[in-house]
Amino acid sequence: MSEQIQQYKACWKQAVDAAEKELDQLYNQFLQNDCELLKENQQSLNQQEVMGMKNKQNQIQNEPHPLDNNSDEEEDQQDQNGHQSNIATSTTKEDFVVNQEIKRELIREVPFKDETLYIYRINYQNGDVYEGELLNDLKDGLGTYYYENGEKFDGLFSEDLIHGYGKYYFIGGHKYEGDWYQGEKSGMGILDFSTGDRYIGGFYKDAFDGDGTFEYKNGDVFKGKWKKGKKNGQGEMRYKDKRVVIGEWIDDELQPF
């Protein structure tokens, strides 16, 4: 089983690294006005990340991925629960819909064959700013969303929502990188906390879900199943002092043997 886990981790990390590299290249092309490559790569990225997102989400819900996760003593569990309550994005799906524009301007026109690629900047009533592509007056394609409170999202949008692959930077120093589905973290992702803790694994509706690994800054590691942001199901806790506990968790509580 451990070999299967390692193979899965390696394959998933390779996919994430490739997506990150492609996204970074796309941003560089965007800045350099490399029109032909920009259009070609953006379409490719949309197809792979946006259109394939629903399949990834279904995998997380319906199939047991052999990826694992972490937690420590009671104090660490309380700390993890505190982290979990703080990973929601600043703007919900509903906020995106009702947030009123106060200014929209075209900041770049990129000629491309028989059409033109338009890059916009939109200022919102609440102080947020969006820079990127639009389709039918909705955020769609590659873009950056700057939140009034200092948070930021770089990545893909579809029909006015964060959707596909992207990176979200939280004001507290946390960072999420991975899959999104209609404005929520859903799919596979990596959540780095400002404390030094890290979660790698499945997400569903902004919460840890499926198989995942939680690595604590003190060296403890929990690998196992999660549901609605809590440890639920079989898991393995490896403490930094080499102790290992294997058992069943329900709502973050290890069940008696």
Image: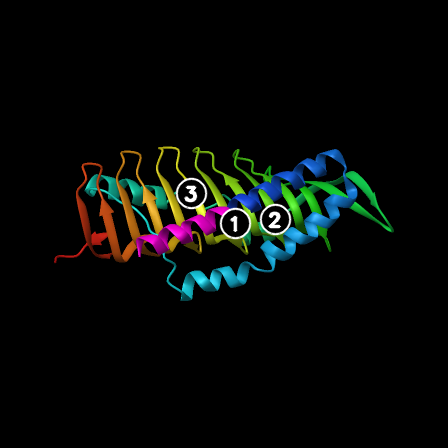
Which residue matches tag 1?
A: 15
Residue at image point 28% right, 40% down:
79
On screen, residue 249 above or below 244:
below
Q: CA distance from mark 2 to mark 3?
A: 18 Å
On screen, residue 146 above or below 161:
above
Residue 6 position in % (x across, y down): 37, 50
Nearer-N-terminus badge (1/3): 1
Residue at image point 52% right, 52% down:
180
Nearer the camera: disc 2 or disc 1: 1
Instruction: Determine the image quadrant of residue 125.
Output: top right
Q: Quadrant of the C terminus?
A: bottom left
Which residue matches tag 2?
A: 156
5 is within the stretch colored magenta? yes
Which residue matches tag 3?
A: 191
Which residues make up the magenta segment? 1-15
Residue 232 position in % (x across, y down): 28, 57
- Crowding at mark 1 (Cα within 10 Å: few <14, some 14-19, many 20+): few
Asked if marks 2 and 1 touch (Cβ < 8 Å), the reply is: no
Residue at image point 23% right, 47% down:
237
Residue 10 position in % (x across, y down): 44, 48
Residue at image point 57% right, 46% down:
19
Residue found at the very far left of the displayed protein: 257
The type of colouring in the image is rainbow
Nearer-N-terminus badge (2/3): 2
Q: Is residue 159 visible?
A: no
